[in-house]
Image (tube, rainbow, N blue to C red):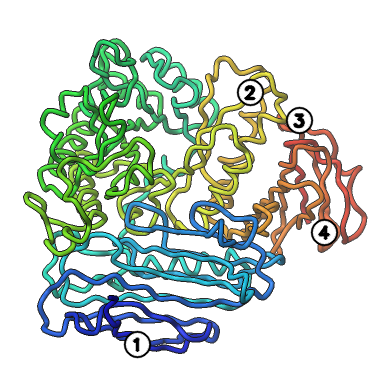
Amino acid sequence: MKKESAAPALETLLGPATFEGPSADGPWRATLASVRPVPGVEEIVLALETADGAPHAPPRCTLALRAPIRGAVACWTPRHVHFEMPLPWTAARIGANAARDLPLYANVGGDGAARLVLAVSECVRRVAIRGVVDEFRADEELSVSFFTEPEDPLARYSVRIRLDVRVRPFAEALSEAARWLDGFASLPSSPLSPSTPSTSSTPSTIPPLPDAARRPWYSTWYSYHHALTPEAVLAEARAAKRLGMRGLLLDSGWDLRRPVRGVPKESPSKVGDWTPDPAKIPDMRALSRAVRAEGLAFVLWFALPFVGRHSRAWRKWADRMLWIRNPGGEEWGILDPRFPEVRAHLAALFGRAVREWELDGLKLDFLDSFELRTSAPAEAPGAVPAPNLPPGEDAVAEAGPLAGRDFASVPRAVVALLEEVSAAVREANPAALVEFRQGYVGPAMRRFGGMLRASDCPSCIATNRIKTVDLRLTSGATAVHGDMLEWDLGATAEDAMLQLLACLFAVPQISMRLAALPARHRAALRFWLRFWNAHRATLLDAPFRPLHPEAAYPVVAAAGADETVTAVYQGGAVADAWQDGAPAGYVVNATGAAGLTIRLASRPASLELLDCTGRRVAADGALPRRAGIFDLPVPPSGLAILRR
């Protein structure tokens, strides 16, 4: 028989809120309150407190709301834009925690304006957000759930659910919600006393950003994968510097994979020792010094949580895993950061790597693998719980931290791990760069990483555009990088440059064998990297205006006081040549076809049209004679330059 719930009531901007929480005869009491700081914005405050003032395992709680559709045509989540409202069989779900996604959800109208933005102040512990259209009532069901996985005992807890129902530009609404989240990102990660609140109004501390984080990079991943040699890496560094790049990321493949008969050489079951393979990189420090002597920052990749069965590290850490992939085969495990000795091991390992190899930074990969997976076979085929996990989550929640662990909560332990790793790395190099990949880009993680990269989407032009724009809207001043760029050497230079133009408003990372580029590809790459470097202040820092998220951002602009840069990604879209009175307008044709439609607020004084290599193909002869909307013959992957 289900226990009666002590359910407080609240009338919100969206109507009555339905709350399911602690049972009436349990130790917890819940209250709901509302704050409306400005018209159209509401913060629902959920507070939990134990009746006896003693710590207890926090209860699972769910707040449910119903939102009218009212012109919404799509929903947005941190993973991608859905091109429909979430139907019962395609419900939009977010499982956000410190190392996964953001507690943000939005509805968008066909006019590109936000209809609803929902944000939750819990940036560390897991928050489950769900949205689905109710076909029986023609509205949308929204729910936010807390404490759905093991958590440390608490005596009190409070969290805010922010609703913004104003109809206004999507980019403005989403960025404001992301800034609001930043105010709740700081959480003490050491084991808390039961009375310590869970949220803080102190803004998160973002590490200082070295200039190299805001310059184009070279990555070895798509270009070399595991076929690395110091000669090849150094040759790419020299070529990259000439083309305008200022950093080199040595990605996966450099580490020694211990030989095991019958196991493929590059199997992940061999990772975890993080020793350079002498057949590939015989002297990592020498390579680091050589790359840095060419004027490029040198950053090294690590799969932070992985330990493979066929590594030496497995012998020490096999009983301290969260979960294991491919059991009985080429298996590897995810280290459990709730063990203090695991955190100390990883912090010492990365600090030593930065110090001994004289690295400028680290790419720390797969942080979103830090999850409890008691139902792993359904969530990730081939994954099972590690042997040290107890039989059920309820037992974990009641027992608190298990033997040897100083946390029950995995997300809080991940934050503690990153604090220890960050301290060790910055002790070795105070200016060290740290790159994280999309998936773990929330405000709690941004305290530790200066570069956030769009997750892997090799050769997928539209996906790279959507991912980088989404990151720009939610990442504040942190440097957003596009996924590494590769393209078909048999393609035209115009088609090849569509890859770079897709992430024009983020820092580009190139991953091609530069010596193998056809001459026209190289000329086009040189031109566009030169353009990017010359205009990076506008591209990265000026007010950012991506239009129509429901249509995958067909036009994106950055408008500064002196210039506007606008990229058009969809044929037929109309682009403003300049905004906010800027004297110069740069309009990029990223549609893949010739010609653009441009709106002019006034007659321009001059016009230049450049092809994808920067060669001028037309000047004032094509100049419109009045204000209005005009078709201009801008070449594919080319540029129109208009001045007042």
Q: Position of residue 460 (x, y in %)?
A: 60, 36
What number is the disc on residue 8? 1
Distance, label 2 to label 1, CA atoms, is 60 Å
Residue type, mark 2 in image: Asp
Quadrant in which the N terminus is drawn: bottom left
Label 3: state its secondary structure.
loop
Q: Residue at x 51, y 66 (%)?
A: 131
Give the quarter of the image for residue 332: top left
Q: Dot 3, how many residues are within 10 Å of its Cα: few (below 14), some (14-19), or many (20+)?
A: some
Residue type, mark 1 in image: Pro
Badge nearest the viewer, 1 or 3? 1
Residue in the foreground of this view, choosing between 337 and 56 = 56
Q: Dot 2, how many residues are within 10 Å of its Cα: few (below 14), some (14-19), or many (20+)?
A: few
Label 4: state its secondary structure.
strand
Residue located farthest toward the front when viewing the structure as drawn: 1
Distance, label 2 to label 3, CA atoms, is 22 Å
Left or right: 242, with 389 as reference point: right
Left or right: 490, with 411 as reference point: right
Give the quarter of the image for residue 526: top right
Left or right: 615, with 195 as reference point: right
Quadrant in which the C terminus is drawn: bottom right
Which residue does the numbered mark 4 point to in the structure image? 600
User: In the rendered structure, which disc, 4 or 2, sits on the residue that comes first in sequence?
Assistant: 2
Badge nearest the viewer, 4 or 2? 2
Q: Position of residue 205 (x, y in %)?
A: 30, 60
In this rendering, is residue 406 above or below 256? below
In this rendering, is residue 275 above or below 7? above
Which residue does the numbered mark 3 point to in the structure image? 615
Badge nearest the viewer, 4 or 1? 1
What number is the disc on residue 488? 2
